[in-house]
Image (tube, grey):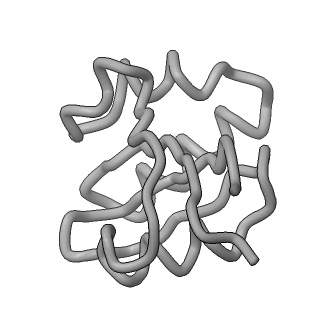
Amino acid sequence: MTTQVRASHILVTSEDDANKILKRIKDGEDFAAVAKRFSSCPSKKSGGDLGWFGKNQMVPEFEAAAFAADQGTVVGPVKSQFGYHVIKVTGKK
């Protein structure tokens, strides 16, 4: 059972922007480079890396998507109170 997830994300204000970013990544652009350029979250300085987190540490929508995704996959857009997230799961333990 996964107890912790490591993820990076890109936070934007619109679903349209999130879909455009998701397409860039699926077309081969580097996730961290796209995060540094487009994310509105302070984590953009580290390429969107949020580090390791457990249950009940993130907003529910973000947590559900991150825990459900396979390691190495990019999912989104996920809507939360903060905006729209494109999430890359980089580790599970």
**Residue 43 pos. (x, y %):** 29, 33
**Residue 6 pos. (x, y %):** 56, 47
**Left or right of residue 91, residue 10 in this image:** left
**Residue 42, quarter of the rendered image:** top left
- Picture layout, residue 77 above or below residue 90: below
Quadrant of the image for the N terminus?
bottom right
Picture residue at 80% right of the left edge, 61% below the top: 70
Q: Nearer the viewer, residue 42 or 79?
A: 42
**Left or right of residue 54, residue 75 in this image:** right
Q: Nearer the viewer, residue 19 or 47?
A: 47
> How many discs mark residues in the rendered view?
0
- Picture layout, residue 13 above or below residue 65: above
**Residue 26, quarter of the rendered image:** top right
- Picture layout, residue 67 above or below residue 41: below
**Residue 55 pos. (x, y %):** 44, 76
Q: Nearer the viewer, residue 63 or 87?
A: 63
**Left or right of residue 4, residue 74 in this image:** right
**Left or right of residue 65, residue 85 in this image:** left
**Residue 13 pos. (x, y %):** 25, 56
Picture residue at 68% right of the left edge, 21% below the top: 29
- Picture layout, residue 90 above or below residue 82: above
Picture residue at 36% right of the left edge, 62% below the top: 84
